[in-house]
Image (tube, helix red, strand yellow):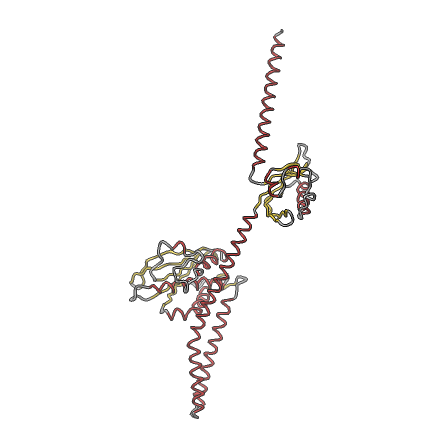
């Protein structure tokens, strides 16, 4: 045997071994890929250019309630009686015609006419080595439970917001009743006096006119109060420009009777800044925080001390910073991080719903795109040291 023949033999054997090794490697790679596809946590399937299913994993069979792949392979969406078949065919055709993927979109799949699944789908065109489209590959994830949970959370949030509005309305009606007590008493006293003087025939025209003027003034006050509260209950559907001092004046007018009744003094240190905002939402935030401070004074231990609520605002760069501070002793450090949670309250059930500060947080962060925090603080005012809580709100201008 010649040397060249021997060399050719060994070279051929080496080539055969290399080819066999490559074939084994390809087989292993193919098996691994099939295992990955079959056990993937999402549904995977592919179709030919005519829309017929050519393969899938078991997740897809579970999703569309088929027993085995024989019930799927070679079938089209129209054969499987999906009510959404026209949408599926349209998507497939668009992807194959444009050679562009359609990624991360939500669609419905109706199974057996009574089970609707919501899925997140991505589809890409399958293209051969010559650049021709030969089908599509799709990945689909069942997100029905997540969507249902999200919808449930939204419904719960709507309920909480409605409860908060009702609670707020109850507080405002109580304020109306309080503010009306004195003018109604004046009107009643004067009207009774006029009637009595006429019955006793001692009426005086000048006194009557003065009494009627006072009755008219108090009636106008009652009418204005109705307008103030009615405006407060209106939902802000659009932003409007308003100066911060005007906003505070409206706020304090709505709760003035409660502040006076509790003997609480408001200390203002404000810049008159023009802002564009949802006016009633910001008024509600002010009212909820001030009401929270008023309630905190119910447990006020320092009987020798005056009760203060400080309100400050200022412009910092492109932001409005608002600080509302009391001297009611502060919030327990163990619960201060919970005060913005819904239904969390330290008050008696008959006194608080635990929704006021939750609504403040919702309105500030979601409607006004700002942030809010509560911090315990100690400070000095008029040479006297106090402890209380600061609510700090930062809103973009």
The furthest residue to the top: 1
- For image coordinates 42% across by 80% down, the residue present is 186
- Image-based side of 223 in relation to 339, left or right: right
The furthest residue to the front: 67
- Give the camera-side residue of 276 and 17: 17
Compared to residue 253, the image places residue 199 above or below, namely below
> Residue 200: horizontal and vertical position, in percent?
43, 92
- Give the camera-side residue of 367 and 277: 367
Compared to residue 197, the image places residue 89 above or below, namely above
Picture quadrant where residue 48 is located: top right
> Residue 150: horizontal and vertical position, in percent?
53, 51
How many marks overall?
Answer: 0
The furthest residue to the right: 50
Compared to residue 130, the image places residue 5 above or below, namely above
> Residue 121: horizontal and vertical position, in percent?
60, 44
> Residue 173: horizontal and vertical position, in percent?
46, 70
- Give the camera-side residue of 284 and 173: 173
């Amino acid at each position: 045997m010649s040397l060249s023949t021997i060399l050719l033999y060994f070279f051929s054997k080496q080539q055969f071994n290399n080819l066999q090794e490559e074939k084994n490697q390809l087989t292993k790679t193919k098996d691994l890929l099939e295992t990955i596809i079959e056990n993937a946590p999402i549904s995977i399937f592919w179709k030919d250019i005519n829309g017929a299913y050519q393969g899938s994993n078991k997740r897809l069979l579970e999703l569309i309630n088929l027993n085995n792949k024989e019930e799927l392979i070679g079938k089209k969406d129209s054969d499987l009686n999906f009510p959404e078949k026209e949408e599926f065919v349209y998507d497939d055709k668009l992807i194959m015609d444009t050679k562009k993927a359609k990624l991360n979109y939500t669609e419905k799949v109706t199974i057996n006419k009574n089970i609707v699944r919501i899925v997140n789908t991505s589809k890409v065109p399958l293209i051969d080595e010559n650049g021709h489209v030969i089908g599509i590959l799709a990945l689909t994830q069942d997100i029905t439970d997540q969507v249902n949970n999200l919808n449930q959370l939204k419904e719960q949030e709507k309920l909480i917001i409605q409860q908060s509005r009702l609670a707020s309305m109850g507080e405002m009606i109580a304020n109306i009743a309080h503010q009306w007590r004195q003018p109604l008493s004046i009107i009643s006293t004067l009207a009774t006096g006029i009637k009595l003087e006429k019955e006793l025939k001692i009426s005086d025209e000048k006194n009557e006119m003065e009494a009627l003027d006072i009755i008219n003034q108090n009636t106008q006050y009652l009418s204005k109060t109705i307008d103030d509260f009615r405006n407060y209950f209106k939902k802000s559907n659009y932003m409007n420009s308003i100066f911060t001092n005007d906003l505070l004046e409206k706020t304090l007018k709505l709760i003035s009777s409660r502040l006076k009744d509790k003997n609480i003094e408001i200390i203002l240190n404000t810049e008159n800044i023009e802002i564009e905002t949802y006016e009633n939402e910001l008024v509600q935030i002010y009212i909820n925080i001030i009401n929270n401070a008023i309630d905190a004074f119910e447990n006020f231990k320092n009987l020798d001390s005056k009760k203060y609520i400080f309100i400050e605002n200022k412009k910092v760069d492109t932001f409005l910073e608002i600080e509302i501070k009391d001297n009611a002793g502060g919030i327990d450090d163990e619960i201060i991080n919970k005060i913005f949670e819904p239904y969390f309250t330290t008050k008696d059930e008959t006194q608080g719903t635990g929704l006021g500060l939750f609504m403040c947080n919702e309105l500030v962060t979601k409607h006004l795109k700002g942030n809010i925090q509560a911090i315990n603080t100690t400070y000095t005012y008029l040479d006297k040291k106090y402890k209380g809580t600061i609510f700090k709100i930062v809103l973009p201008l």
